[in-house]
């Protein structure tokens, strides 16, 4: 039987007893009906996972004891950064969740000229915290022990102007005539996905100046969230840890 995996956002070590964070404990006690003696896996996002046993359950409070640590590497050899224009509604939650499951290393939420979403500084920080929680939950589900980095949303041109990434860089643009991919990533790639209305011409020029190649994801126009997942799946299948499946 597959054991429940729990993320705890603080350093862990074998042989200690900890009380789980409030929200996690409430879910474990009230939804999963955890009982004393139940086995779990607990991880802190730094690479190790710990065997654990539920010691006490008091209402919505749960304490567990940590056993042996194991360093299980489920990370892709291809380190992918996803530069994602923030879509409206809760679609960004879906993108963060699925991108985490697909092994993305870093997500950079950006706001472009044609973005419908607008965020002030306070909203940006709040959104980043929320998406980090979504990523942590996705790691619990998919078995990753390292959390992807989720950056605070920022203007697209600000990111491109300050970025010093030396990775293989691709911007997916449905109206692009495309460029032949004469090279391939060694260990690092960066991909950019636009908003509902696509990137503005000056943004595409900024991508070009930043070393991005313009490519298509087939003949059909994909929604922003579909494009992100399709691009990541293509990268992992061709260059990452989904090859040969």
Image (cartoon, helix red, strand yellow):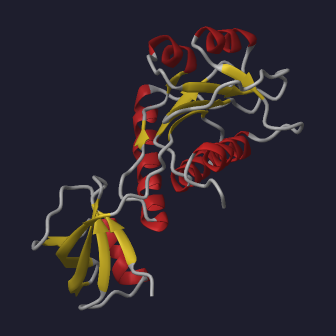
Residue 239 seen: yes
Percent of width and height locating residue 39: 30, 85
Percent of width and height locating residue 66: 18, 74
- Left or right of residue 198, residue 147 in this image: left
Percent of width and height locating residue 212: 63, 19
Q: Residue at x 36, y 78 (%)?
A: 28
Residue 66 or 178: which is nearer the viewer?
A: 178
Q: Residue at x 54, y 56 (%)?
A: 101
Q: Residue at x 31, y 74 (%)?
A: 41
- Left or right of residue 117, residue 14 in this image: left
Residue furthest to the right in view is: 219
- Left or right of residue 26, residue 114 in this image: right
Q: Quadrant of residue 211?
A: top right
Residue furthest to the left in view is: 15
Q: Residue at x 34, y 82 (%)?
A: 29
**Up-down: is 126 above or below 180?**
below
State which quarter of the image contains the C terminus. Answer: bottom right
**Up-down: is 148 above or below 212?**
below
- Left or right of residue 167, residue 151 in this image: left
Percent of width and height locating residue 201: 75, 11
Q: Quadrant of residue 50?
A: bottom left
State which quarter of the image contains the N terminus. Answer: bottom left
Residue 27 seen: no
**Up-down: is 162 above or below 152?**
above
- How many numbered tags mark residues here? 0
Residue 83 or 212: which is nearer the viewer?
A: 212
């Amino acid at each position: 039987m597959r054991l429940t995996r729990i993320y705890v956002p603080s350093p862990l070590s074998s042989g200690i007893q900890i009380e789980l964070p409030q929200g996690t404990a409430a879910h474990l006690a009230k939804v999963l009906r955890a009982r004393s003696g139940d086995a779990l896996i607990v991880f802190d996002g730094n690479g190790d996972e710990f065997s654990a046993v539920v010691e006490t359950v008091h209402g919505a409070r749960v304490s567990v004891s940590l056993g042996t640590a194991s360093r299980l590497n489920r990370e892709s050899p291809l380190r992918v950064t996803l530069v994602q224009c923030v879509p409206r509604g809760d679609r960004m939650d879906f993108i963060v969740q699925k991108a985490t499951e697909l092994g993305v290393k870093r997500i950079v939420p950006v706001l472009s000229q044609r973005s419908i979403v607008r965020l002030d500084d306070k909203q940006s920080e709040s959104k980043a915290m929320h998406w980090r929680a979504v990523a942590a939950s996705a790691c619990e589900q998919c078995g990753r022990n390292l959390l992807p980095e989720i950056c605070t949303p920022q203007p697209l041109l600000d990111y491109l102007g300050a970025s010093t990434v030396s990775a293989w860089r691709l911007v997916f643009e449905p109206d692009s005539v495309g460029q032949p991919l004469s090279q391939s990533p060694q260990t690092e790639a960066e991909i950019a996905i636009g908003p509902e209305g696509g990137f503005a011409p000056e943004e595409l020029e900024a991508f070009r100046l930043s070393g991005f190649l313009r490519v298509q994801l087939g003949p059909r126009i994909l929604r922003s969230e579909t494009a992100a997942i399709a691009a990541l799946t293509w990268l992992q299948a061709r260059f990452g840890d989904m090859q040969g499946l």
